[in-house]
Image: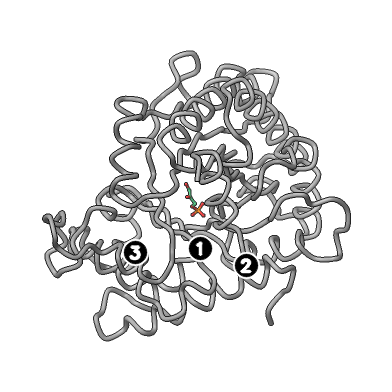
Amino acid sequence: MSNIEELASVAKQLVAGNRGILAADESTTTVGKRLASIGVANSAPNRAALRRMLFTSPGIEQHISGAILYEETLLQADDEAGGAAAAGQARLVQQLSSRGVLLGIKVDTGLAPLPASPEESFTQGFDNLAARCAAYKAAGASFAKWRAVIHIRQATANTPGLPSEAAVAAAARGLALYAAISQAAGLVPIVEPEVLADGAHSIELCEAVTQRVLAAVFKELADAGVLLEGILLKPNMVTPGSSAAPAAPAEVAAATLRVLRRTVPPAVPGIVFLSGGQSEADSTRHLALMNSGALPGPKPWVLSFSYGRALQASALKAWGGQAGKVAAGQAAFMARAAANSAAARGEEEA
Ligand code: 13P
């Protein structure tokens, strides 16, 4: 297969069969917060135990096509110590590969204040990006992820609204350059421009900002020569701010579809949403509505999921870091994964 055919084939495979992606690429700091919420220390063996609990869930491959990993997990040994695997030693990710779940890797290195507008951020990670992508590919990864973050603030008489032009431009250019580098290394880029839900803004403002951001992202992807058949888009859903009154699920689904139809070319094989702090139930319901007959009209891409918190929250609680509760954690994880698979078919589970 040529590089182009391989990219298009992997992108399609990631959204085939109503399956979605597990985002398990929390940085060491972020996963530490998740572990702290169940009273578990943030050590390499505990991080490995959490990921092992998820990856070895019986039947994971029925609902999960790929998992996005942090570098530590991609290289970690499948043993009690959780250090980097030595040559020839079994790796934790073989638990996924042996079940047919594709390996993804977070290649950005986090956020920093944007000089032109320091209350906003830009994404770091271009140092050695081509070489790192090549090394991840050699370590078994077939796709990558890079997250750009956009803040919303309603303008007032005294404060300008956000995002600034500089923030949108930096997010779009960064994503496009990353996507081009990633494809050149043979990794399918997941392009993630996350418009944050933080704030009390309206759903209308979220819709306008999300549309502006996605339009900028696809212009830059085109200019950078990115093969659209070989990417997946990972956007936020269009919702009111998390401290505003919630919108009706049908309104969220309709506004999200409207923005995607206006901005995402049909050449893109799949759109895999982030959950962005929505509850597990809301993330699932919104996806089901978008895929249901209740919202007719063109949907030229597969609409599926790439959730972090919305796939892991109940599982984390049910597991609680206890060896004796691995099966309970896995059952909770599989219940969310199955419900989201059903939502990818447009069905709501009871
Ligand atoms: P959430 O679904 O928890 O928002 O995480 C998805 C993700 O990968 C964020 O980068």
Q: Marks 2 and 3: CB-CB under 8 Å? A: no
> Which residue does the image show at 74% across and 35% down from the upper left?
263
Q: Nearer the viewer, mark 2 or mark 3?
A: 2
| Residue plotted at (54% across, 71% down) | 63
Q: Residues within 10 Å of mark 1 (few under 14, many from 20)?
A: many
Q: Amino acid under label 2? A: Gly
Q: CA distance from mark 1 to mark 3?
A: 28 Å
Nearer to the camera, 98 or 82: 98
Q: Which mark is residue 247?
A: none
- Secondary structure beneath dot 3 equals loop
Which percent across, then down, holds residue 335?
53, 78
Q: Amino acid at mark 3?
A: Ser
Point out residue 165 in the picture as x, y percentages from the top left corner. Answer: 62, 18
Element assignment for label 2 = helix
Seen in the image, is 164 located left or right of residue 324? right
| Residue at numbered disc 1 | 65
User: Residues at badges 1 and 2 in contact (C-beta under 8 Å)?
Assistant: yes
Mark 2 sits on what residue? 17
Task: Give the residue type at disc 1.
Answer: Ser
Return the mark for residue 37.
Answer: 3
97, above or below 2, in the image = below
